[in-house]
Amino acid sequence: MRCTKLVTIVVLIMFTLTAVALVGGCGKSPAPKQSLPMSPENEGAKAPDPAPARMVIGYYENPWPGTPDQTGSFPSMKAFSKSMSHVAPFWYKVTKEGTLETKESQLVFDTAKQAGLKVFPLITYKTGAIETVLSNPAIRTKAIDNIVKVVKEKNYDGVNIDFELLKPEQEKDLTAFMAELYPKLKQLNKTVIVSVFPKIDVHESVHAAYNYADLAKNADFIQIMLYDRHWATSEPGAIAPLKWYEDNLKYAIEQAGGANKVIAGVSAYGYDWPEGKGKEAESIKYTDAIVRAQKNGAKIMYDDENQAPHFKYPGHEVWFENDKSTAAKLDIVAKYKPAGIAIWRLGQEQPEIWPIVDKKFPKQQ
């Protein structure tokens, strides 16, 4: 009997302590609920579906006027679709009137969908149009409504807003554009990506318009273009030196609010710089680089510090990307674990990069 009373008392004490812990939490506040970062204008917008653990986006382009849909990026998209989760075709340009100049292809769209790829077309702008589109509220709204309309009508899975080379003073206008576009597309449960320039070891005039923190609040992802450290009119050098690549990816993740908000660009092309100050380089594919080296008897060297292949032939210097340089970048990607990678562009790459992508950065099954 005494033992029974003792057990009863112990049980009552334990029950009381448990109730106190549940109510008072031992003086600790409950953990805050996680929510999508939003600007005040976007409160109430529909939260997106959980993002894939790994997004592998292939940029799609047919760069030659008058060429059929099957050329350019098409063969690569078909051949390596199993390694990708999304395709981002270069199809739309905003005009100064707020309309969209289109270059869409039903064949490409249907082929992508049959391969199980989601489609995120790029939205760029016509030469001379962007200042009006960003600064004029009426034109801005018209452009946004036309983007929303085409996404809805064509049943795209989202968009990538790719407004490049903006002036530093256009920072607030770009953020305002995204703040207006984002909730309208979220109501349709569409994904919104905004492309941004890297900031470390890049001139301020190139990157100042892209406020990572503010843009991340008005997009699902920011896609940092981690290439063109050396570009067509610069001196010759690696397209994306490894330390530069890592420094910029790390900075973007810090500023955007976490790795889950960032997509890392991966270059697949090269440049052939002619000798002579002020001469513009030619953008080339991996196969172009190999053929030129072989034709000219040039030995392909590899820069271990920058992780990039290069060679010289009479009157020219070539830097490009291959499977080894891509693997080095994907090791950095694996280290920081961003939401995805975006390869510029399909058809320029060495085919052997795809097994490396599958191994080092596999898409979600």
Image (cartoon, grey):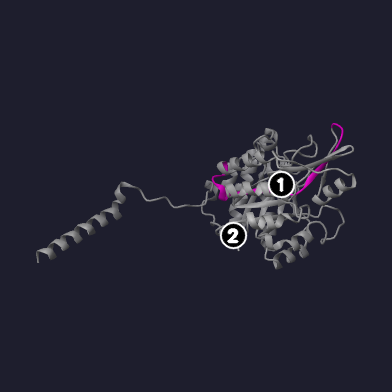
Q: Closer to us: mark 2 or mark 1?
A: 1
- The answer to if 144 sits in the magenta stretch is no
- The answer to if 262 sits in the magenta stretch is yes
Residue at 65% across / 43% down in the picture? 174
Please say if the residues under marks 2 and 1 sit with CB atoms less than 8 Å apart: no
Q: Quadrant of the N terminus?
A: bottom left
SS label for mark 2: loop
Which residue range is magenta in the image?
Answer: 255-277
Number of marks in the image? 2
The quadrant in which residue 118 appears is bottom right
Where does the image place residue 161, in percent across and percent down from the top left? 68, 49
The quadrant in which residue 129 appears is top right
Residue under label 2: 189
Where does the image place residue 126, in percent across and percent down from the top left? 77, 47
Where does the image place residue 276, in percent across and percent down from the top left? 87, 32
Name which residue type carries label 1: Ser
Give the Cα separation between the discs numbered 2 and 1: 36 Å
Name which residue type carries label 2: Asn
Residue under label 1: 325
